[in-house]
Image: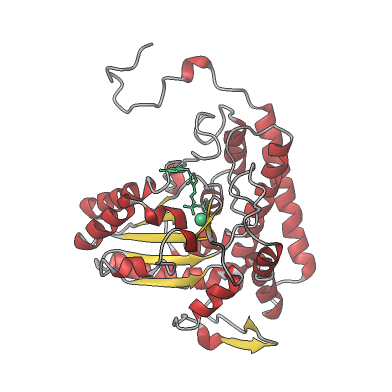
Amino acid sequence: MYMKIPYFWALCTQYKDLEMASVKDKVKDNGKTKVTGYSKFTKETYLFWYEKMQLLRKFEEKAGQLYGQQKIKGFCHLYIGQEACALGAVSALKKGDKYITAYRDHGQPLALGTSPNAIMAELYGKSTGSSKGKGGSMHIFDKEVGFVGGHGIVGGQVPLGAGLAFAEKYKGTDNLCICYMGDGAVRQGAFHETLNMAMLWKIPVIFVIENNGYAMGTSVQRTSNVTELYKLGESYDIPSEAVDAMRVEEVHLAVERAAERARKGDGPTLLEFRTYRYKGHSMSDPAKYRTKEELEEYKAQDPIEQVRLAIFENKYATEADLEKIDKGIKEVVEASVKFAEESPYPLATEAYKDVYVDQNYPFIIE
Ligand SMILES: Cc1ncc(C[n+]2csc(CCOP(=O)(O)OP(=O)(O)O)c2C)c(N)n1
Ligand SMILES: [Mg+2]
């Protein structure tokens, strides 16, 4: 059974009972919510968001094209439309914090500052890639920026994320782990076991459900009675809230609140980021299970356009300034393609390297 009303409007009705952090800043303008000011955010923050979100978008638009030309092979899941989910977290957290996610994993490392060259080379399967060409699109890793993958098993990263956070608590740091997952992952047993233990042990982890409405072609409504996913955290006494993740400011504020709780020793928070992916599940998905109107309703709330609007409203930059940023991004993306194309494939002798930490692991046959 498919939804009777467009998904977006179903979400709006769900939003109305929620206390959104900056609701006082919003006014109604011809029925559309318009933000008049998130006063705590500076010009630098807005320009950081704009530049990085554009980088994510342009990088992935290029990756999509290259996939079509069969230059990129294997799986490729694009994050287009969900950019605010990564950027609002990066601006709210600090160096030393860990990030982990599923296979839709180009956005977080790009937002954190991993070189676009290393990510593009990984998509090409080249030895200069962030996982030496052995991971591909679903397995980007970058220890330097705290990005711990890139995981292909739905929900598999959830216990790993809690484990990363436990390690920080055990070592006595004030770092935390932000653990992203899709709406499909919350129907996995491992998710529930992890939430239970994380709250019991007050582990400094922020669980983020990126609710983009679908797990492959299956809508949230078709998998459970519980469609307001933040409520799942409440069964484990975890402070939980839904967030309008088409607005990077809302993401930042929610992550900031969760981080404060985690660093104080109060344990996990569950955030349901309400978002949307503009493209199909992966490159081979024509997305026939949803309507054009539904997609357009989300595009009208585009996270980058909303940041652009806020920049103009606050006079933080002119159109010409943003065009200059866009031009720079285009060059960075083009350079990453050149770098990937000119890089060598890994040698066959690399196949057994970096598989096990223990060099004498008995099953390695040279
Ligand atoms: C344990 C497991 N079951 C099934 C799959 C196949 N699979 C890959 S992605 C996916 C959908 C997951 O959707 P969601 O968690 O909502 O993430 P999204 O793709 O929307 O980001 C499924 C079922 C898998 N990778 N792992
Ligand atoms: Mg999903």
x then y, percent, for residue 147: 44, 47
Question: Can residue 298 be seen at all in this image of the molecule?
Answer: yes
x then y, percent, for residue 222: 48, 60
The N terminus - image quarter: bottom right
| Residue under the image location 32 percent in, 71 percent down | 239
The way the protein has been coloured in the rendering is: secondary structure
The C terminus - image quarter: top left
| Residue under the image location 58 percent in, 49 percent down | 281
State whether residue 225 is above or below residue 177.
below
Asked if residue 350 lies left or right of residue 277, the reply is: left
Q: How many marks?
A: 0
Residue at the extreme top: 366
Asked if residue 261 lies left or right of residue 26, the reply is: left
Residue at the extreme right: 320
x then y, percent, for residue 142: 47, 42
Q: Nearer the viewer, residue 39 or 158?
A: 158
Asked if residue 17 lies left or right of residue 106, the reply is: left
Q: Nearer the viewer, residue 249 or 46?
A: 249
Q: Nearer the viewer, residue 155 or 10?
A: 10
| Residue under the image location 57 percent in, 35 percent down | 122
x then y, percent, for residue 282: 60, 45
| Residue under the image location 67 percent in, 39 percent down | 336
Question: Can residue 259 be seen at all in this image of the molecule?
Answer: no
